[in-house]
Amino acid sequence: MRYGILGTTQARHDDGTPVDVGGARLRALLAALALAPGRARTTGALIGEIWVTDPPVDGHGALQALVGRLRRALGKDAVESVPGGYRLSADPDDVDLHRFERLAEEGGHALADGDPAKAVDLLDAALALWRGPALSDLPDATAPAARAEARRLD
């Protein structure tokens, strides 16, 4: 499974077919989990990132319901329950933002090493991952989105 958060949040099967992720809150949950693929995110952090200023009365129950919907969309093993939270079962390279960061770093090293042709290939591949504003479905992702945009402009 591949995840896109450089633009509208999306998921695609390995063969490229899109997965219907659903509504805004479901996309926000996926974006929040995709920020840290393979790493645990606490329920409190996820609730804060999805509902920002207006969390539901039963935030844990609402989050659990969203996780259930996301598992139905992506597959039951895509989101793991961990003590105190959830984790997206993915490698960083499965998420376009992290793949962009890796390619941009490798491109910078190639340029510093005097290999401009390799740098162009890597940096072009990194820029091609962008489909719109970073983390556009995550209501309060100003800081990580700004870091990604600054890196893109570099």
Image (spheres, helix red, strand yellow):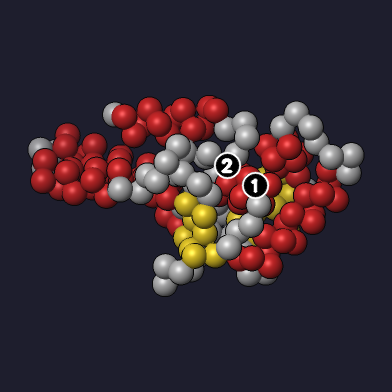
Q: Is residue 63 above or below residue 48?
A: below
Q: Which residue is mark 2?
A: 137
Residue 83 visible in the snapshot? no
Which residue occupies the extreme bottom position in the image? Answer: 15
- Residue 48 lies in quadrant: top right
The mark nearer the N terminus, 2 or 1, is 1
- In the depicted view, which residue is nearer to us: 25 or 111? 25
Q: Which residue is mark 1?
A: 24
Which residue appears at 11% of the width and 42% of the height?
Answer: 115
Q: Which mark is residue 3?
A: none
The percent coordinates of residue 108 (x first, y second) are: 24, 37
The percent coordinates of residue 29 (x first, y second) are: 65, 48
Q: Amino acid at mark 2?
A: Asp
Which residue occupies the extreme right position in the image? Answer: 57
The percent coordinates of residue 80 (x first, y second) are: 68, 60
Q: Is disc 1 surrounded by few (<14), some (14 to 19) or many (20+) residues within 10 Å?
A: some
Q: From the viewer's perspective, is 68 left or right of 29?
A: right
Q: Is residue 78 above or below residue 47?
A: below
The percent coordinates of residue 105 (x first, y second) are: 30, 40
For mark 1, give the secondary structure. Answer: helix
Q: Are marks 2 and 1 in contact (CB under 8 Å)?
A: yes
Which residue appears at 79% of the width and 54% of the height?
Answer: 64
For mark 2, give the secondary structure. Answer: loop
Residue 73 visible in the snapshot? yes
Q: From the viewer's perspective, is 135 left or right of 46?
A: left
Which residue appears at 45% of the width and 57% of the height?
Answer: 94
Q: Amino acid at mark 1?
A: Ala
Q: Is residue 129 above or below residue 51?
A: below
Which residue appears at 42% of the width and 67% of the height?
Answer: 16
Which residue occupies the extreme front position in the image? Answer: 23
- Residue 35 lies in quadrant: top right
